[in-house]
Image (cartoon, grey):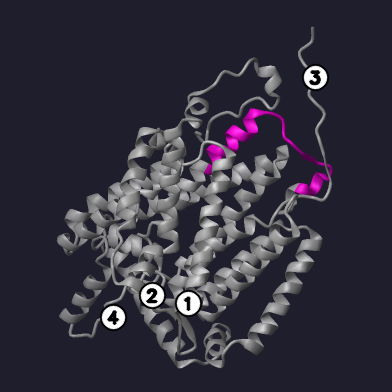
Amino acid sequence: MNQGKAEAPSNPALAGPVLPSAEDLWENEAIRRISFRFCLAALFLRLSVLPELIYYVTQHNTYLLYLVGPLAMLTTLLRGGIQRTFSARAAYYWLGFVVWMILATPFSSWRGGSAASVFSYLRVDVIFLILVGGLALNWSDVRSIYRTIAAAALVNLLTTKLFERMDAGRMTLISTGTIGNSNDLAAQLLLVLPFVMYFGMGRGRSIVTRLVVLCLLLWGLWVILETASRGALISLAVVFLCLLIRGSLPQKAVLVFFAVVAALLALTVLPFETRDRLGSLFGGKNKEAAESEASRRYLFQTSVKYTFEHPIFGVGPGQFSNFEGRSSAEQGQHGNWHATHCFLTQVSSECGLPALFFFVAGLGSALLLVGRTYRRAKREGYPDVANACFCYVLAMAGHLTALLFLAQAYTFELPAMVGLAATLAIAAERTMRAGPAPLAADNPSAGRTWLPPAHFRRPRPSPGPAS
C-alpha cells in the first residue's frame, strides 16, 4: 500500500461490484499457506533464539535456520513478497541504508572486516525485511504473526527461568549469546512483550486469557527489572508514558496505581545490588554503574567525533571498536575497544551521515505508517486493527529507547519491524476496504483510548444511489 495512495470509498456499496484481486486468488493457494508457515517458523526461530538454546543443551548445531530460511525466502519471492514489502516507503529508506553500507565498505578502515559484517547482515538479518514485509494478506495472517512473536516471548521468559545467572545483582543467561547479556535481554523483552499484551486487549477476551496475559506481562516486567539495566528502566518509563497518553481516565488511574505498587514491590523484593545499580539512575552511588557510565560517555563522544571526521562513509561498517582501539594505541593511550553503546551513533560513525538519514527515515516512516493506520482504524470502528497498531508502536517505543544505550543497529529485529509495518498496513487496508466497519463506538472520545469502549453499535448503512 503506497502511503500517498488515496483511500478507497468509505461505502463499498457505491463503488460497484468488487472483482477478485490477484491477492484474493493467491490467498487460498496451498503453496501460499506453506510459504506463510515457513516465514513464521523463521521469525520464531530468530526471536526465540531456539537454535542457540538447542546448541547449548546438545552441543550440536541443528542448522534449523538454514533448513527453514532459504525455503521461506524462495517462496516469499515467488508469491510477490518484494512488491508488498516495497509498497511502503519505509522499505525504500531501509534499502537506501543497506546500499550505503555497501558503498561505505571500500572506504572502511578495515575493508575485509567490513565486508564480512555487511555480508553477514545481508545473509541473515536484512532478509527479514522481505520475509516479514510480504507475509500477510489478510487480518488472520496478522494475528498469526502476533501469535508467533508472543510465542517467542514465552520461550524467552522460559529461557530466563531455566538458564538464568545472577552476576553482581544482574540477571544474565548462560545459554545464549544473542540475549545472554543483561541489556540485550531487556531490549529483546521490551520488543516482544507488547505482542503478548495484544491478546489481552479488546472485547471478547475470556477472563482466563486476560489473566494469562497479565501474568506473562508481570513476569516479563520482573525479568527486565532483574537485569538491572538502566536503559531498560528508561524504556519502561517511555512505554508507561505511551499507555498514559492513549488511555482513558479510568485506565490512567489503574496504570498509576499499578506503577506505584510495582515500584514498592521492586524496592522491597529486588536484591540490594540490583536496587543499588538501578538507583544510580536517580543519583545513587554504585561503583560498577559509575564506571560503566564513564565508559559509555567516552564511547559516545568518540563516536560523535568520528562521525564529523568521516561524515560520508564513516570508519567502516562494524569497525568502530577496532578503529578506536588502534587510534588510541597510536597516540600512546589505552583504547576502550568497545562498540558505541548507541545504535544511532553506531550507524553515523561507521557508515556516515547519509546512512543515518536512511536508517532513521526508515524507522520513522514505519512508525508514521502504522500511526496512520491506527487513527483510521479508530475512526472507522476497527478496534482489533487499532489495538494491533498500538501494540506495534509500544514495542517500537520501548525497544528503540533501549537501543539508544546499545550497539544493535545491525540486528534482524529492526528490518523485521519495518517489514511488519508494511504488512500490517496492507492487511489493515484490505480489511477496512472489504466492507463497513463491524462496530462503531458510541463515545466520540473513543479515539483517545487504547482499549475499545464498553458499548458499541453497528453503524447505519449508507443510503444507496438515488434512483
Decide which of tag 1 and tag 2 comes sooner along the chain. Answer: 1
**Quarter the C terminus occupies:** top right
CB atoms of marks 1 and 2 within 8 Å: yes
User: In this rendering, which labeled residue sits more in front, label 3 or label 4?
Assistant: 3
The stretch in magenta equals 424-446
Q: Residue 463 carries which label?
A: 3
Residue 175 is tagged as 2
Q: Quadrant of residue 307?
A: bottom left
Report x, y in % for residue 9: 66, 25
Q: Say which label, 3 or 4, has the lower sequence index.
A: 4
Residue drawn at x 44%, y 60% is 47
Residue picked out by circle 1: 162
Q: Earlier in the sequence, mark 1 or mark 3?
A: 1
Q: Does the magenta stretch include residue 30?
A: no
Label 1 SS = helix
Q: How crowded is mark 4: few (under 14 residues within 10 Å), some or many (20 or more)?
A: some
Distance between the Cα atoms at labels 1 and 3? Answer: 61 Å
Asked whether 304 or 89 is in front, the reply is 89
Q: In this view, does 213 lie to the left or right of 67?
A: right
* Pointer 4 residue: 336
Q: In this view, does 435 lie to the left or right of 172?
A: right
Q: Nearer the viewer, residue 60 or 147?
A: 60
